[in-house]
């Protein structure tokens, strides 16, 4: 679905859409798309079912922008590629600057949709780094704020699939050229959907790393123990109440293992998580499977959650139930969780008409770990800018600290790596004000020959450094196993 050449204006013998929709599309283009008021246009159509990850995999381009987002339990997925526009900002005003650019683009974009749907129209994909300054080293291709508008996008929800093609109107000399370009892209999509490869199967090379799973049990152990002890001293001195410290490991990566293959493994194992992938043209891919939603939003309803306090899963039902009770009754974990709730409510209050949540946390169980979990439902005030709300919530104490401004300088002081996009907001939003961002934990960055993985823990007054170390090992294993080690 890429714009590689001027389309042949000869009418296809079989249209990929109904004649009625084709007539409406023609009329829309003739009426609106030569107006000086618009520079961009987004065209959305219902298409036959295909697994968006399979489509992305079949059209994977190392030298092109690629994006994937899925939460299998919600029956929702996005695949997209071929960047049309990039919104990149940095500095203390990066969220506001990004919001301003998004709002300006919406004013110069006209949209056509064959069906009325909240996911139609121009969509912005990407995320934000943990800190607001450009990162060094292996993060150099990831801006502190980056939202991309793709040339093609497929969204799957529980009802049907929607494809959106977004164009620069100035690239087409006549309405006929634009119309036939859209038809050509829909034919390509239809041909893929009805090819011999069955939807959902994808194309796998079955590559594996010919080595045992790396031993991460002692990598950086001494530095970790020292950092946690220093953090606890600051807590005792009332510098802050909580801080989240993370560690980073680098291991060999076999680039024959496609990022889509890793995501396919993750989505099968973690259906309740947000599985995401952001690929830049220089072969750097940020991907992961995070259990933590930062916020989902639609029509002024904003859903977020507190997710903090962790315990391993049991090998038997009895052991798992016992560990769940230990987690619920743990003073250390409850304190850590309550800091997150308090911070979210303090930050969201200026934008909220109402805030609702339960008073006792639930337990969210993943395949290898369980967390204290409190969903929070917010009704936003009218005319609230979504990215401003995302900025206010980032970082939650689950990945930063409490109070944040006091804990903030100690993260860079006590950690020995640049977080980049790790633990930052990653997700999407569209022209209709619908979208979702998650906290990019349980994640990794793939370079040409190396994979960099990250995991963190909340440190409070009674944290045990050795126990927190074991927790990071537990959190690193899903990403390591997804690399297909023998």
Image (tube, rainbow, N blue to C red):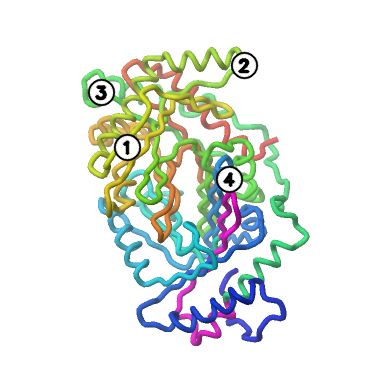
Circle 4 residues within 10 Å: few <14, some 14–19, many ≥20: few
Indicate yes or no whether the magenta region holds residue 172: yes
Q: Which residues are magenta?
A: 154-181
Frontmost of labels 3 and 2 is 2
Q: CA distance from mark 2 to mark 1?
A: 40 Å
* Label number found at residue 75: 4
Sequence-wise, the earlier of marks 3 and 2 is 3
- Of residues 475 and 466, the one drawn nearer to the viewer in this rendering: 475
Sequence-wise, the earlier of marks 4 and 3 is 4
Sequence-wise, the earlier of marks 4 and 2 is 4
Q: Tell whether label 1 touches label 2 (CB within 8 Å).
A: no
Asked which secondary structure carries label 3, the reply is helix
Q: Is residue 413 left or right of residue 176?
A: left
Sequence-wise, the earlier of marks 2 and 1 is 2
Q: Tell whether label 3 touches label 4 (CB within 8 Å).
A: no
Residue at 35% across, 78% down: 37
Sequence-wise, the earlier of marks 1 and 4 is 4
């Amino acid at each position: 679905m890429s714009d590689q050449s001027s389309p042949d204006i000869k009418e296809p013998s079989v249209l990929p859409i109904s004649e009625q929709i084709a007539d409406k599309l023609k009329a829309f283009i003739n009426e609106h798309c030569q107006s000086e008021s618009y520079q961009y246009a987004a065209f959305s159509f219902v298409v036959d079912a295909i697994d968006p990850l399979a489509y992305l995999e079949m059209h994977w381009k190392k030298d092109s922008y690629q994006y994937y987002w899925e939460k299998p339990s919600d029956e929702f997925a996005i695949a997209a590629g071929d960047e049309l526009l990039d919104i990149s900002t940095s500095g203390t005003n990066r969220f506001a600057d990004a919001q301003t650019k998004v709002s300006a683009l919406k004013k110069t974009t006209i949209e056509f949709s064959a069906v009325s749907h909240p996911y139609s129209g121009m969509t912005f994909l990407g995320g934000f780094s943990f800190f607001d300054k450009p990162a060094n080293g292996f993060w150099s291709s990831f801006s502190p704020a980056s939202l991309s508008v793709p040339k093609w996008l497929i969204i799957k929800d529980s009802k049907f699939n929607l494809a959106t093609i977004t164009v620069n109107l100035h690239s087409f000399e006549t309405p006929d050229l634009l119309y036939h370009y859209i038809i050509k892209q829909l034919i390509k999509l239809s041909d893929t959907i009805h090819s011999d490869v069955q939807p959902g199967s994808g194309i796998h090379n079955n590559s594996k790393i010919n080595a045992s799973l790396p031993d991460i049990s002692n990598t950086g152990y001494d530095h970790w123990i020292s950092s946690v002890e220093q953090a606890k001293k600051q807590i005792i001195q009332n510098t802050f109440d909580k801080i989240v410290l993370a560690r980073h490991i680098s291991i060999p990566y076999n680039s024959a293992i496609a990022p889509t293959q890793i995501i396919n493994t993750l989505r099968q194992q973690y259906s309740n998580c947000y599985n995401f992938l952001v690929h830049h043209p220089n072969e750097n891919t940020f991907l992961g499977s995070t259990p933590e939603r930062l916020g989902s939003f639609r029509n002024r309803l904003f859903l977020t959650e507190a997710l903090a306090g962790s315990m391993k899963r049991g090998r038997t039902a009895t052991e798992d139930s016992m560990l769940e009770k230990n987690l619920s009754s743990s003073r250390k974990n409850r304190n850590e969780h309550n800091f997150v709730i308090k911070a979210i409510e303090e930050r969201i209050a200026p934008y909220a008409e109402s805030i609702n949540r339960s008073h006792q946390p639930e337990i969210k169980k993943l395949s290898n770990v369980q967390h204290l979990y409190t969903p929070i439902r917010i009704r936003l005030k009218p005319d609230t800018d979504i990215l401003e709300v995302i900025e206010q919530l980032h970082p939650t104490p689950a990945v930063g600290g409490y109070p944040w401004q006091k804990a903030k300088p100690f993260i860079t002081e006590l950690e020995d790596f640049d977080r980049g996009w790790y633990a930052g907001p990653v997700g999407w939003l569209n022209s209709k004000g619908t979208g979702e961002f998650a906290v990019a934990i349980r994640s990794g960055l793939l370079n040409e020959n190396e994979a960099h993985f990250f995991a963190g823990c909340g440190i409070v007054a009674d944290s045990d450094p050795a126990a927190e170390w074991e927790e990071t090992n537990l959190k690193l294993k899903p990403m390591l196993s997804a690399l297909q080690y023998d």
